[in-house]
Amino acid sequence: MSREHSRYRWFVVVVFFFFMLLHQTDKLMIGSLQVQITDDFGISNTQWGLVNSGALIVATILYPIWGYLYDRFARAKLLSLASFIWGATTWLNALARNFGVFLVTRASTGIDDSSYPGLYTLVADYFGPNLRGKVYGLLQLAQPIGYLVGMILALMVAPMIGGWRSVFFITGGLGLVIALFIYFGIKDMPRGKAEPEFEQMVEMQTFKFSWDEVKQIFKKRTMWFIFLQGFAGVFPWNVITFFFFAYLERERGYDADSILFTMAPVILILAGGYFLGGALGDFLFKRTRKGRIIISSIGVLMGAIFIALALNTPIEARTQFFVFMCLTAIFMPLSSANVIATVYDVTVPEVRSTAQATEYFVENGGAWIAPVLTGIIADAVDLQTAILLICVVAWGLCFFFYLGALFTIDKDAQDLRGQMAERAKAM
């Protein structure tokens, strides 16, 4: 690999990091704005759940379409289009003056939320299997940092500049700027270029999308366990993202400053957990193909234990609550980068966007249910019960699904390496 190429691939990572950071800021800050928006429109927890479920449903429907397009056409140009759509739909959402229009325009923001498979597969063609976990972990730092930036914008900046609509105009405008950076600055790579069998080849065959290879995705037993854990695993993330700030304010009595000073360190620890998970997954993957699955199973098990301890902490014991939330934040993201890397450990390059999009499609099948279910339980009992019940049950299920994947990953990964070796010999 030339030094110029090595430098350029890290430039790509930097651009994609800022795309994800600003996009996640725009997407996730709505959780911090719950009280402002629900008071503005006078809506219930259940209606608030519908607002967030709408965007998730739209994203779910579009995942297979985005995945197919990424495997057929230039991924960088499609990512630029997604960034433009992000900016435009956020502006439309800011213009809403009644709940019906707000609900519809918020749902439209889900169009670009399903655009990530192309980003991850393009990165996979710049970095080989032994580095992907760390790179994905680094990119996914953007999600919790974006959450933190969104929280600051919602709790501190919005009141000073005219409310939640004003910050939506800011983040929407940044989406349009990033669209230009991606369109003019990012180049596509041949699919499969970073696979060990092809990495040293100056020229290589172009692998084209194939429906036969798409069918093979569903014959990989590991992918079925990945699908199952994806469906269950997104429940806790969506519950915490969309309801945790209201829980702190309404049921634990935190004011805006207390929320910020409690959650900011937790989110920063969460950010570190993404990279830690990817790095640990790469480390163990070099020794056993089960490595990424082992790290993922530990993450969900310990996350369930510590969130239960945190939510059962007495309201007056704020320090104890903070400690348990920090421990939860370490383990929650350990599986994230490893799941993405595992998908690419068992699928061929020309259908990886489709494979990843299918996994996200299944995930969002659970994701859109989570906010509405949480709202219903919260209205019937309270937010603490809703968050605790959903997180513990969902992560418990994920742990058992990962145990299943431990028995299938070796064969599926070996089959891919054999297929890549055969292609390399044929060139």
Image: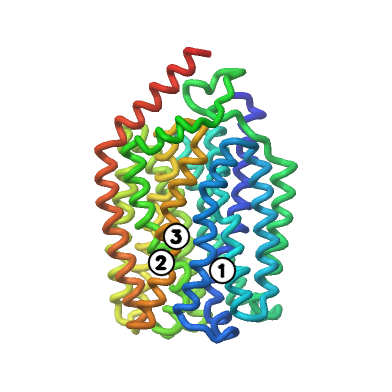
Residues packed near mark 2 inside 10 Å, few (<14), some (14 to 19) or many (20 plus): many
Mark 2 — residue?
370
Quadrant position of residue 416: top left
Q: Nearer the viewer, mark 2 or mark 1?
A: 2
Residue toward you, 280 or 50:
50
**Residue ID at (33%, 65%):** 391
SS assignment at label 1: helix
Residue kind at label 2, given as amino acid type: Ala
Residues packed near mark 3 inside 10 Å, few (<14), some (14 to 19) or many (20 plus): many
Q: Position of residue 330 (x, y in %)?
A: 38, 58
Image vertical order of residue 73 relative to residue 335, above or below: above
Can see residue 13? yes
Q: Position of residue 164 (x, y in %)?
A: 64, 76
Residue 3: mark in rendering: none
- Which of the two labelled residues, at mark 1 and mark 3, occupies the earlier sequence position? 1
Image vertical order of residue 415 relative to residue 163, above or below: above
Whole-angstrom CA distance, mark 3 to mark 2, is: 24 Å
Q: Position of residue 49 (x, y in %)?
A: 47, 73
Residue 29: mark in rendering: 1
Residue kind at label 3, given as amino acid type: Ile
**Residue ID at (70%, 52%):** 178
SS assignment at label 3: helix
Whole-angstrom CA distance, mark 2 to mark 1, is: 18 Å
Whole-angstrom CA distance, mark 1 to mark 3, is: 18 Å
**Residue ID at (70%, 69%):** 169
Mark 3 — residue?
269
Quadrant position of residue 4: top right
Image vertical order of residue 16 relative to residue 286, above or below: below
